[in-house]
Image (cartoon, rainbow, N blue to C red):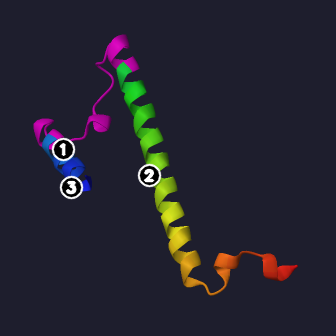
Amino acid sequence: MLEMEKKRGKDQMENNGGTFWWEEDIEGMGLEELEMYVNALEKLKKNVIVRANALTMANVMETSSALPGFAQGFRGLQ
């Protein structure tokens, strides 16, 4: 899946003169185009947040599994 996304991004960049869509100049856009652009940026932001959270959780799980006794939680502190 990640490889497909990388290929799609590379293809889009090649078709767009070497830039990503979010790097386009907005000065010449009309109101409808700007609204679509803002919506696309908001979707991108949400996707980045979801991905960052997933990576953070994966890192926490990996780190916690490497710590002896962590799986039992804080029951030993009572």
Q: Measure how far apart labels 2 and 3 are at the Cα level.
A: 15 Å
Q: Identify the residue at image location x=18%, y=44%.
A: 8
Whether residue 62 sits left or right of residue 67 in the image: it is left
Q: Identify the residue at image location x=52%, y=62%.
A: 56
Q: Secondary structure at mark 2?
A: helix
Query: Where is residue 42 drawn, in percent x and y?
Result: 45, 32
Of 53 and 18, the residue lying toward us: 53
Query: Where is residue 27 drawn, in percent x and y?
Result: 33, 22
Residue under label 2, please give it.
51
Whether residue 15 sits left or right of residue 68 in the image: it is left
Q: Callout 1 environment at 10 Å: few (<14), some (14 to 19), or many (20+)?
A: few
Image quadrant assignment for residue 60? bottom right
Of 6 and 78, the residue lying toward us: 78
- What numbered label is drawn on residue 3? 3
Q: Identify the residue at image location x=80%, y=82%.
A: 76
The magenta stretch spans which residues? 12-35
Q: Secondary structure at mark 1?
A: helix
